[in-house]
Image (cartoon, grey):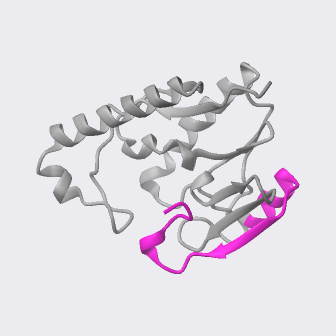
Amino acid sequence: MRARPVFLVTEPSHFDVRYQINPWMRPDAWASDPKGRRDAAIKASIALVEALSLAGARIETVPAVDGLPDLVFPANAAIVLDGKALLARFRFPERQGEEAVFNSAFALLKARELIEDIITLPDGVLQEGAGDAIWDADREFFWAGYGQRSTESSITVIERVFGKEVVPLKLASERFYHLDT
């Protein structure tokens, strides 16, 4: 029997676009209708959680934190594979507060035996989770982006932590700031 997949989501009540750290973020557009845009984000989040639950997934929710509007992108929180979570270290100060929140969330998952090990990156190494490291289950290796948000030095850390090959891809445009974009 296959294990039930587990998804980490963040409650979206504090989602906002109040700064710009990529070309697609438009605080001016958000400011034109913040309530309507937040309501739409909350509705979309609820629909996603319902769809995942109906598909048989287990949902783990991280509470929203005022002042951390990008917390709603938990794929960036870590690389998770084979019971291990390699926690992210964010490039931009606007997102760095998320690190402690997600560290606590993964500690709770470990205490409940949903993951086995939590690993932190060495000082000076930036890596933004599954946004820049995508597991290719068919080929059994990671595709890993670097250059915009994650540093090239993160590649060897991913290989060492997971014991898997990593195919590095230099991201050359700020328009594609993460590999998953």
Picture layout, residue 105 above or below residue 72: above
Q: Quadrant of residue 136?
A: bottom right
Nearer to me, 148 or 132: 132
Picture layout, residue 75 above or below residue 178: above
Magenta stretch bounds: 155-181
Q: Residue at x 76, y 22 (%)?
A: 113
> Can you give x and y, in whole percent of width and height, for residue 50 in the image?
44, 26
Picture layout, residue 166 above or below residue 131: below
Q: Residue at x 30, y 57 (%)?
A: 19
Q: Residue at x 46, y 30 (%)?
A: 51
**As drawn, is 108 to the left or to the right of 99?**
right
Q: Quadrant of residue 168?
A: bottom right
The reply to whether residue 151 is in sight is yes
Nearer to me, 120 or 82: 82
Q: Quadrant of the N terminus?
A: top right
Nearer to me, 41 or 156: 41
Residue sticking out furthest to the bottom? 172
Whether the magenta-drawn stretch holds residue 134 is answered as no
> Can you give x and y, in whole percent of width and height, for residue 164 in the image?
85, 57
Whether the magenta-drawn stretch holds residue 168 is answered as yes
**As drawn, is 92 to the left or to the right of 139?**
left
> Can you give x and y, in whole percent of width and height, for residue 47 in the image?
38, 31
**As drawn, is 45 to the left or to the right of 169?**
left
Residue sticking out furthest to the left? 32
Total of numbered circles in the picture?
0
> Can you give x and y, in whole percent of width and height, for residue 7 in the image?
58, 33
The reply to whether residue 89 is in sight is no
Q: Residue at x 16, y 37 (%)?
A: 35
Nearer to me, 178 or 108: 178
